[in-house]
Amino acid sequence: MLPLLKTAVPGPESRRLAAALARVESRNITFLSEGFPVFWDRAEGAAVWDVDGNRFLDLTSGFGVAGLGYGEKTLVAAVADQAGKLLHGMGDVHPTALKAELCAELSRLTFEAWGAGPGKVILGCTGAEAVEAALKTAALATGKRGVLAFRNGYHGLGYGALTVTGSDFFRAPFAGQLADFAHFVPYPDAGTDPVTYAEALALHFGSFAHPIGAIGAIVVEPIQGRGGQNIPPAWFLPLLRRLADGAGAVLIFDEIFTGWYRTGRRFACDYDGVVPDLVCLGKALTGGFPLSACVGKAAVIDAWPKSTGEALHTSTYLGNPLGCRMALESLRLLEEPGLGETVARKGEVLLAALRELEAKEIGFARARGRGLMAGIDVIDQEGNPDPARAGAIVEGMLAEGVILLSDGPERNTLAFTPPFVLGEEELRWAVGRLNAWGESSSRSDSSQGG
Ligand SMILES: Cc1ncc(COP(=O)(O)O)c(C=O)c1O
């Protein structure tokens, strides 16, 4: 379903709502500009309708959540059925059968599938909470406070998750209140030489200030998502596994974005055959309910003491029955045979189109992707990152009916994480529109001197 616009974008109702929202919401939250935002009304598959009746093509899956697409019929039916039965339970006191079923399913699809089972689970609501549960688990399991994390890594914005998020943009305003237990090292580019990288790490941790033995956890995204769709070389995760084992540290994979077939395999780490000690899951796990999970090897999670009636780590909505039901139904759909192959095939179509775009030399560089997680950088005529043009493209594409986001440390990466149901023709069409943007901006570069 290609875009179908009934009004200029944003339309009059979106504009009215934006003005109303601006009066009552923190001005830091919703980005408001001439071209942003459109207010969503309903969605189906990869199509989103706004309050003005315009139909958009969503290339983001709503931050990677709607892998299965929007409005999947059996998922919606499960929500309706569950809503009629029980909306809320007492997660850590009197839970539901659904929570037990979901934890068993998460164990089966992670550590049991990796041959390292059984796994044990700590449920949460947001991705940040899953990461924080993992950090606490690692501290209990190792008794060590140091954490190795990566520049441009993104793990969420609660204080715990922010402590290991490697972005100055998010950290700087709160630096005075952030704990100092994370040591940030570079995330390697695809072409990085393993020996040089290992030597650089050894230098970093060789000093008295940073003894590697003080590291209790390594937390890493197997592909950096918000940090710019960075795909590391194949030696990277095995190196981290060896490093964690050598340091007596817990290896945490944050698969919140990459998990559940986003990259064509159930988990991005499956490409390298590396098994973590803890894995953080969220986003597509439910397809639209705030539920996350930290799943770990049973022996590692058993570092937590047995509850004596007051859990050390819980929250009001832990194991919410609606979320558990949605997760169980989503997992059933995600695990249908052939989904990974479909994502991988569509990913190849997307990457080929992005590479073609790059080859035209019209201000796009570094096309990259794995499965339906891809990116391309917007650069100026000198080859430098061009976040202003990336922003203009994002707004311009919205005006044409395509929902797209830019990310990366320089905000110049166009990120593609569409729903798996998006058709190959629609993918080619959307990248074709970028082509027009590249050509028009290179024309205006030469006529107006940038
Ligand atoms: C890899 C990764 N980890 C953690 C998070 C944080 O998740 P949430 O926004 O649900 O807290 C995100 C969100 O984009 C993410 O991409």
Image: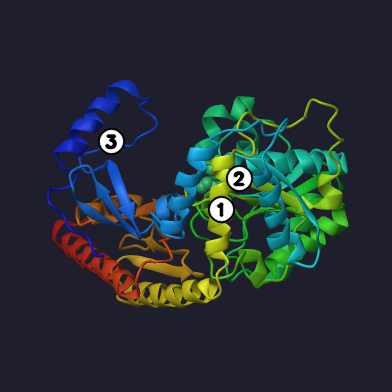
Residue type at mark 2: give it: Ser
Q: In this view, does 302 lie to the left or right of 71?
A: right
Q: Mark 2 highlights which residue?
A: 292
Is tag 1's residue or tag 3's residue first in the polypeptide sequence?
Answer: 3
- For the residues labelled 2 and 1, the Cα–Cα distance comes to 7 Å
Question: With 444 as the anchor, is 157 left or right in this view?
Answer: right
* Circle 1: residue type: Leu
* Residue at point 23%, 32% (across, down): 17
Q: Quadrant of residue 59?
A: bottom left
Residue at 75 percent across and 60 percent down: it is: 111
Q: What element does badge 3 sit on? A: loop
- Label disc, if present, on residue 340 of the rendered structure: none
Q: How far apart are marks 2 and 3 (CA)?
A: 29 Å
Please tell me whether residue 293 is drawn above or below residue 441 in the rendered image.
above
Say which mark, if any, is on residue 32.
3
Q: Name the residue under label 1.
A: 285
x, y percent for residue 285: 56, 53
Tag nearer the camera, 2 or 3: 2
SS for callout 2: strand
Name the quadrant of the N terminus. bottom left
The foreground one among 297 and 201 is 297
The residue depicted at 21 percent of the width and 67 percent of the height is 436
